[in-house]
Amino acid sequence: TYVSGIRFPPTVTLDKIETRTDGNITVKGYALLNRELQITIENEASKVRQHTNITTPASGLYAAVLPMKNLPLGAYSLFVKYTTDIRQSKLVNSLKRQR
């Protein structure tokens, strides 16, 4: 059986769910090979949003280290999507920045 035209969304995991003021978060997952991804960290309450674009390697396993130092304290959601697609993977209120 041959199946085509199916596009799997990127998977997403974090190395931790809380970070301090000067900390970083590592985002990892699998996605289609050699595709550009947009990683978004968002705090709905304060309307703060930070975007990072990366390109997946030939293995499809991606990783990005995101600095949290410029983000205010609070709870954040993290999204990962292909830059050519509106569908996204989402971790809801999974990330907290503390002092």
Image (spheres, grey):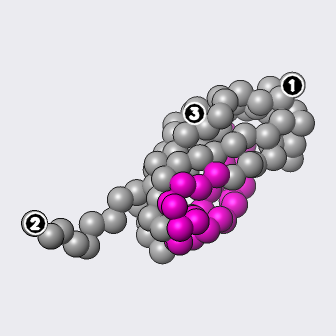
Distance from disc 1 to disc 3, alpha carbons, whole Å, reads 18 Å
Which mark sits nearer the N-terminus, 1 or 2?
2
Quick one: SS at disc 2?
loop
The residue sitting at 64% across, 52% down in the picture is: 63
The residue sitting at 74% across, 48% down in the picture is: 65
Q: Which residue lies furthest to the left in this view?
A: 1
As drawn, 88 above or below 23: below
Quick one: SS at disc 1?
loop
Q: What amino acid is found at the position of numbered circle 2 in the picture?
A: Thr
The answer to whether residue 43 shows anywhere in this view is no
Main SS, magenta region, reads strand
Which mark sits nearer the N-terminus, 3 or 2?
2
Dots 3, 2 in contact, CB < 8 A: no
Residue assigned mark 2:
1
Q: What amino acid is found at the position of numbered circle 3 in the picture?
A: Asn
The boundaries of the magenta stretch are: 34-63
User: Label for residue 93?
Assistant: 3
The answer to whether residue 12 shows anywhere in this view is yes
Q: What amino acid is found at the position of numbered circle 1 in the picture?
A: Arg
Please give left or right for residue 91 compared with residue 52 in the image.
Answer: left
Q: Which of the two discs, 3 and 2, sits closer to the camera?
A: 2
Q: Which of the two discs, 1 and 2, sits closer to the camera?
A: 2
Label 3: how many Cα within 10 Å (few below 14, some 14–19, many 20+):
some
